Image: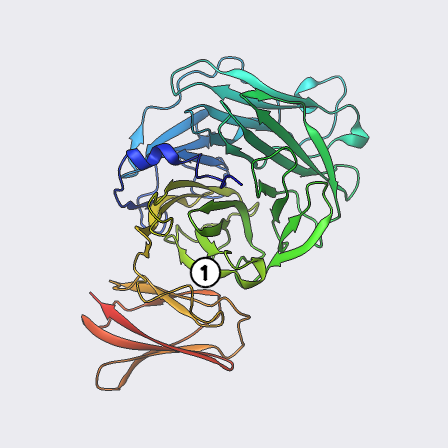
């Protein structure tokens, strides 16, 4: 079976393997000037291809912003929006195909009005490149108020639309508690009519759902990460498989999510939102969803309110073509109202800033990264967090120099007040204890 994203990112292998590490954010006091940074929610969706990041922005107009993925600087916007109309928002989320085509969807979030096509028609537009005119690539017209769902908060494009690809979107009924998943299959560069799939009601009502397939095929199984709900795997017909990823690994406050395979590894990357989050997380699921474990996270973008949990991730993956082990993974992140970032989390098979971490570690072990660290580091705990969880830092003489309570599965620890040198970090979480070396730069 062809690995998801290996074909999708094969071209990036020839672009180079430069490590990426930049952040433009509220927390860094350098958020993009074009970004709403209060509670405006004007930047909600993004996509990426190789060394470019694309963000839909409604600050001061309607734009698809283009960012240099290597350093985070602004590039010229996508230039032509001819005919982009309709919907509550004419554009809301954007994705990029490996052939360079840019796809962006509108958002239907208002009540159904049979006389007003802007409230009944979901659209996906396509630009062949940054300067081309857009065309309508796919549509779905809701036939009645009873069938109408909110659609367009997130959509995903997996594969190359010039060859074979899968496109997903999902939403909640306006008039009931049900949910529908919309799937378009692209075969030989030709997109087919959508298949509409009913899924069981979610445990917690949510209007924002992220759907991603596990294969590029005519009937792929898929996973859904809905705000406030556990990440769950579904069969192609929408029935439950019974497989989930624990909330301690991918929390309830997560949304935009991607599954991909590269070399011998299987991963899930997800965007985490909320005043203590606003970052992306990379999780290893090679041994199955039940054994999912944190690999690394991107930098926190800020703590500005993000009530609708909007944001997104994009991936640049450089596969190791020799033995499939030393892959490189870069994650681009958008946090609504908080900022954007690009971070290489794995380079040539090494988890950056966390070189002591190995997939053979016990699932209940805490991980610390980056390492070495400058002013702060993170503690990641993939099991349930106990009420009395704590971390202690000791110098090389065995003297305790710092302690902190752990109240989140990804805990930030400030070490600005410590001198440069080597320390021991001891994490106590119920019966699970972990000790690791930390180097302060």
Residue occupied by mark 1: 294
Q: Secondary structure at mark 1?
A: strand
Whole-percent x, y for residue 309 in the image: 55, 47
Residue in the picture at 30% in, 50% down: 348
State the image coordinates of residue 428 (x, y, percent, origin top left): 44, 79
* Nearer-the-camera pick, 231 or 378: 231
Quadrant of the image occupied by residue 85: top right
Q: Nearer the viewer, residue 350 or 211?
A: 350
Decide: few, some or many residues near mark 1? Use Cα within 10 Å; few <14, some 14-19, many ≥20.
many
Q: Is residue 359 left or right of residue 371?
A: right
Q: Is residue 109 above or below residue 257?
A: above
The quarter of the picture where the C terminus appears is bottom left
The image quarter in which residue 181 lies: top right
Q: How is the image coloured?
A: rainbow
- Where residue 221 sits: x, y (%)? 64, 43
Report if residue 144 is visible in the image. yes
Asked if residue 157 lies left or right of residue 318, the reply is: right
**Is residue 210 positioned above or below 85 on the image?**
below
Number of numbered discs: 1
Residue located at (57% from left, 37% from top): 154
User: Closer to the camera, 23 or 224?
Assistant: 224
Residue at position x 58%, y 26% in the image = 186
- Residue at x 73%, y 37% (from the top left corner): 197
Residue 108 locus on image (x, y percent): 64, 30
Q: Is residue 60 above or below residue 347?
A: above
> Where is residue 63, by image quadrant?
top left
* Residue 33 visible from this viewpoint: no
Relative placement, left or right, of 395 versus 192 is left
Which residue occupies the foreground of this view, 419 or 136? 136
Figure check: 269 above or below 316: below
């Amino acid at each position: 079976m062809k690995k998801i994203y290996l074909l999708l990112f094969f071209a990036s292998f020839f672009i180079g393997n430069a490590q990426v590490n930049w952040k433009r954010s509220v927390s860094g006091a350098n958020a993009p000037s074009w970004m709403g940074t209060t509670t405006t929610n004007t930047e909600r969706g993004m996509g990426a291809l190789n060394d470019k990041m694309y963000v839909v922005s409604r600050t001061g107009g309607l734009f698809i912003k283009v960012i240099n993925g290597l350093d985070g600087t602004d590039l010229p916007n996508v230039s032509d929006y001819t005919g982009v109309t309709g919907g509550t928002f004419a554009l809301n989320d954007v994705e990029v195909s490996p052939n360079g085509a840019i796809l962006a969807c509108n958002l239907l979030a208002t009540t159904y009005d049979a006389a007003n096509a802007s409230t009944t028609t979901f659209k996906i537009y396509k630009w062949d490149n940054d300067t081309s005119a857009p065309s309508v690539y796919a549509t779905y017209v809701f036939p009645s108020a009873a069938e109408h769902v909110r659609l367009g908060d997130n959509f995903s494009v997996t594969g190359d639309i010039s060859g074979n690809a899968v496109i997903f979107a999902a939403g909640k009924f306006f008039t009931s508690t049900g949910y529908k998943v919309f799937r378009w299959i692209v075969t030989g560069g030709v997109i087919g009519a959508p298949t509409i799939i009913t899924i069981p009601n979610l445990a917690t009502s949510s209007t924002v759902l992220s759907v991603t397939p596990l294969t590029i095929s005519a009937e792929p199984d898929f996973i859904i990460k809905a705000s406030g709900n556990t990440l769950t795997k579904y069969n192609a017909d929408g029935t439950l498989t019974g497989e989930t990823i624990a909330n301690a690994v991918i929390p309830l406050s997560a949304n935009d999510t991607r599954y991909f395979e590269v070399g011998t590894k299987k991963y899930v990357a997800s965007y985490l939102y909320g005043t203590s989050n606003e970052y992306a997380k990379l999780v290893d699921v090679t041994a199955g969803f039940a054994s999912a474990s944190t690999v690394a996270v991107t930098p926190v973008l800020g703590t500005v309110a993000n009530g609708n949990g909007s944001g997104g991730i994009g991936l640049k993956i450089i596969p190791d073509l020799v033995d499939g082990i030393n892959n490189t993974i870069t994650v681009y992140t958008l946090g609504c109202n908080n900022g954007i970032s690009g971070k290489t989390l794995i380079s040539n098979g090494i988890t950056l800033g966390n070189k002591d971490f190995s997939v053979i570690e016990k699932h209940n072990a805490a991980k610390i990264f980056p390492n070495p660290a400058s002013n702060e580091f993170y503690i990641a705990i993939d099991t349930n967090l106990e009420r009395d969880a704590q971390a202690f830092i000791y110098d090389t003489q065995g003297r305790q120099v710092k302690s902190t309570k752990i109240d989140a599965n990804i805990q930030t620890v400030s070490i600005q007040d410590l001198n440069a040198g080597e320390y021991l970090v001891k994490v106590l979480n119920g019966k699970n204890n972990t000790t690791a070396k930390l180097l302060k730069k």
